[in-house]
Amino acid sequence: MVLSIFLIAALSAMSSAIVGIFLVLKKMSMLTDAISHTVLLGIIIAFVLTKSLTSPLLIIGATVVGVLTVYLIELLIKSKKTSEDAATGVIFPLLFSISVILISLNFRNVHIDVDAVLLGQLELADQDNILINGINFGQKSLYIMLLVFIINLIFFLVFYKELKISSFDAGLAFVLGISPLLIHYMLITLVSLTAVAAFNAVGSILVIALMIGPAITALLLTNNLFKSVILAMAIGVFNSFVGYFLAVTTDLRISGMISMVTLIVFLIVLFFNPKNGVIAKLFLKKHQETEFTLLVLIMHIFTHTSNNDLKEVELTKISKELNWKESKTFTYIKKGIEENYLEKHGLFIFLTPKGNEYHNLKINEFKN
Amino acid sequence: MIFSSWFANNYTMIIVALGAMLLGFASGLLGVFNILKKQALVGDALSHATLPGVVIAFLLTNTRNMVTLLIGASLSALVAMFLINIIKHYSKIKSDASLALILSSFFGFGQVLILLAQERGNAAAGLKSFIFGQAATMLKQDVLMIAYLTIFILLITLLFWKEFKLYIFNDEFFQSLGFSKKITNAMLTFLTILIVVIGIRTVGVILMSALLIIPGVAARQWSNKLSINGIIAGFVGMISGLLGAVISSQKTNLPTGPVIVIVLSILVIVSLLFAPKRGIISKSIKQHKHQKDINKYQELISVFYNPSKDIQLSNDNFLLMENYLIIDGRKNIHITEKGKNKLHQILGGEH
Amino acid sequence: MDAIKIEGLTVSYDLKPVLWDVDLNIPSGILMAIVGPNGAGKSTMIKAILKLINPVSGTAFFEGKPYEEMRKKIAYVPQRGSVDWDFPTTVFDVVLMGRYGHLGWFKKPTKKDHILTLEALEKVGMSNFKNRQISELSGGQQQRVFLARALVQDANIYLMDEPFQGVDAKTEKAIIDILKLLKNQGKTVLVVHHDLETVKDYFDWLALLNLKVIAYGPVDKVFTKENIERTYRQGTISIEGDA
């Protein structure tokens, strides 16, 4: 039981990561918000038609509604009557509100718990087992999620080239004979399918976090598309593991905890990534600013010494020339002397040989 | 007599309706600016992000005092805003992705806390009304507070109107005139957070963004002037707030948020279809008429574009009869003043 | 006294220099072009002296005074592309916004501002368009509106960023006529310009810019084959200058 719940979460995470990377790259992250809200309507409509909560038609119907949602949003965008983000914010609230009203009014005796809608019922996933000839094959959700994962994986591997090109340059894709539109809608269909399949287990909110969170965490760490997908899957699984563990320890909802861990892991990478994390950047920026400012001073002295214009290199004149505060000039001259780039003779500042070298080195750097 | 007793019986509902009307107006109005700033979905992220703050405030103070809960909401919205800005500033992650992550993780956290609160006691039942909104169960003093804050928001928006307008249109020029981009942006953000925080009890965290966005989209179809846009958006929000609050209070299980959104959606669909210049139906009617005109006046148009071409006109051609064209002694065709006016009407623009 | 005096202006972006040690002494009453290859720092220079971006070092004086004191006498015309022309506003409104600097925070435009706006629209030939939605304008018309917005500020110094970019010939002529008129009134006009062909016809002074100031002064003196080659040579100019 424990393992199967974790497996469902992990498979949801991996399926989501695959499609999530491309959504992020195509700047369509908020479509996950739209789709995850509207699949509920699809489920309700399918339920009304099939009178059963477990028919595979439910999954198909809900997926179709998800795709339809995106189609409507894009229709609205194409009509140029409103901007992209506003279009999203117009379509999905309507579809979602209809679902909520239908549920609230206990329409046709649909009894769906709102919490389950939003957060899923991962804990109860092990109650819906497949029994064939009396043999328990395990949780239905597990098989569904496994199937979806395999579909997503195959899609990713088969269409990798096309996905890559159409994510970065739709125009080029078209010219090369790849239909960006077709790839786009295949992607959207899989996003919708994944959202529906995961919905039952992890709820609509976690679907969004699973699709986007690990993906952007991975993109902070690598620029390589293939690597980022693999990494996103790994991070998704990791988040699920930690989230599950925390949920069990604190007796809180598993899906909610996973979504929190997703954010925290992202923030940790954002801040502490040695390459370009926030802390690294602040450090580097301060250091580079200092270096650059010192260089300005050195260049100034170089120029004016070369011109045999000794007057300019007088201490007091430097501040005026550069329009720096006296204190700033003083600080940087001191730094220059400390680094042995500059030396002071009476009232004048000169470059040392080391300073000369440093100057020429930097000039060459800037030539590139 | 009858009216006054109806009034007395429905006193609470009237207050609630008035509060919802004010909220809708301010939200629609402010939303116009957010849409133009291309930050329509920031409201969505912020409203979802208020949930943990509300619940934590409840868990810490154990009261359902609206002021306390709203302070909690503001704080968690501010934290979310802070994170969104950090992500934008220090990484190449685009804003839509960071909004999606903040939205889902904060909301997920909030949901988890609600379930936790539910286990602790029964007072938590009220917290659920923050998810989809429940206007009918609000206390009178809460509604009054919402009303006062909303009026405050309206006044500040009007005060900063020209600054917001120019800042969003051309921020560099705005700065060059001596204004501060930072202050103006902070003011807009502050007002947005405030309206979101005020609105979540009525509309719910999930659908608050709809009350910010949809009125502006509807209004844009009717007018090209910013001020008119604002007023129409305000009215759309106001009507939706009113009808949503009233209708949802008639049935006990019906949350307010979705009903408001249904009204908003009807209004925006009507706008998209029927607005005079931009509406889809209006455009298609115009298109149809234009096509008919081109057919009817085709000879007139031919003469205009090809004056030297030999065009045969029978004597009873209506263009001659009605003086759009004349034939002179040398059998040359000329366009009359009337004909020129008609051409101008059909072909439009300048010649 | 110089209209604009730029001293030792150095600007960097992402720790690479974009402008290096720029010195310019620009007299008043001239029409001056700033020319150079893309990315040479032309727009950056304008933005830096307007304090829209922070330089690493250097400063600018306007009629001998610092920018903050002279702000009301300086008009900036940004690039047309820096604006979303789908914004719901009319031609009249855009030009009226030029008066906001004189109004300051919170005050509403007065009748006087409205009159000045109409006058400015008249000068650029856009009076008939005053109620037109700006998304319906052509490139040339948009540029005229931007110019009117600057005119309405009643400034002494005009800083314009690529005003002739993507503009029809008729509009270009109309704009340059207005700029010449301003010059004759003793105003100083600085224009970031992209078209070498028209420099000699339009402008009195020229500054050739590529990271550094290659040369500047009266057009006849500065607009030489040698200078232009030096400016547009492939690869960045070295910072210490050529011997």
Image (cartoon, coloured by chain):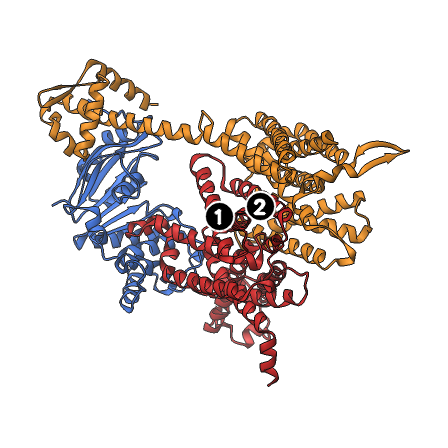
Chain colours: A orange, B red, C blue
* C118 shown above or below B124: below
Q: Is residue B347 visible?
A: no
Rendered view: B289 above or below C214: below
The residue under label 1 is B77
The 10 Å Cα crowd at callout 1, few under 14, some 14 to 19, many 20 or more, is many
Residue C120 marker: none
Q: Where does the image place residue B37, in percent across and percent down from the top left?
A: 45, 51
Q: Earlier in the sequence, mark 1 or mark 2?
A: 1
Count numbered badges in the picture. Answer: 2
Query: SS for tag 2?
Result: helix
Question: Mark 2, residues whose alpha carbon is within 10 Å: few (<14), some, or many (≥20)?
Answer: many
Q: Residue shown at 11%/26% (left/top)? A: A314
- Left or right of A242: which side holds C142? left
Callout 1: SS: helix
Q: Where does the image place residue B192, in percent across and percent down from the top left?
A: 46, 54
Q: Which residue is mark 2?
A: B110
**Relative height, residue B242 to residue A186 (above, below):** below
Name the residue nearer the viewer: B19 or A67: B19
Chain label for disc 2: B
